[in-house]
Image: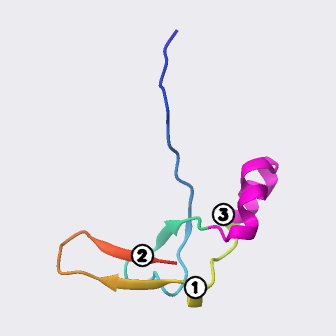
Amino acid sequence: MLSWGPVYSGVMTDCNEAIRPVHDRMPVLLQADEYQQWLHGTFVDAIAFQARCFPDELIEVKRTDELGRAALLW
């Protein structure tokens, strides 16, 4: 039996306008009132998070001088 131990999976979606200057995809971001639905909802609920766009006004991107690094604040 193969044991992987703790694992992580990221779910991506199309970017919103705040992220577009950096990349065409972004992680699915949740607001606090969505945590329970994400953790205990159905597969259809999870897919719905991937299909919606996180609000531009809730994201601030601060570029750094370090290549390959950007701070994403929400």
Name the disc covering residue 58, or none.
1
Which residue type carries mark 3?
Answer: Gln
Q: Counting residues from the N terminus, which is met first, the one under dot 1 or under dot 2?
A: 1
From the viewer's perspective, is residue 34 above or below residue 62?
above
Q: Residue furthest bottom?
A: 57
Amino acid on which the number 1 mark rests in the picture: Leu
**Quick check: is 17 in the magenta stretch?**
no
Q: Residue at x 51, y 83 (%)?
A: 59
Tell me which label, 1 or 3, sits earlier in the chain.
3
Q: CA distance from mark 1 to mark 2?
A: 11 Å
Q: CA distance from mark 1 to mark 3?
A: 17 Å
Taking the image as shown, residue 4 lies to the left or right of residue 13, namely: left
Residue 25, horizontal then vertical, whole percent = 48, 69
Left or right: where 63 falls relative to 17: left
Q: Nearer the viewer, mark 2 or mark 3?
A: 2
Residue at the front extreme, as displayed:
32
Q: Secondary structure at mark 1?
A: helix
Residues drawn in magenta = 30-50
Where disc 2 sits, the SS reads strand
> Quadrant of residue 33 in the image?
bottom right
Mark 3 burial class by Cα count in 10 Å: few <14, some 14-19, many 20+:
some
Q: In the image, is residue 53 above or below residue 40?
A: below
Q: Tags 1 and 3 in contact by the CB under 8 Å rule?
A: no
Q: Which residue carries the number 3 mark?
A: 50
Mark 2 surroundings within 10 Å by alpha-carbon count, few (fewer than 14), some (14 through 19), many (20 or more): few
Q: Which residue is mark 2?
A: 72
Mark pair 2, 3: CA separation: 18 Å
Q: Decide: few, some or many residues near mark 1? Use Cα within 10 Å; few <14, some 14-19, many ≥20.
A: few
The colouring scheme, among rainbow, by chain, secondary structure or one colour, is: rainbow
Tell me: residue 14, above or below residue 12.
below
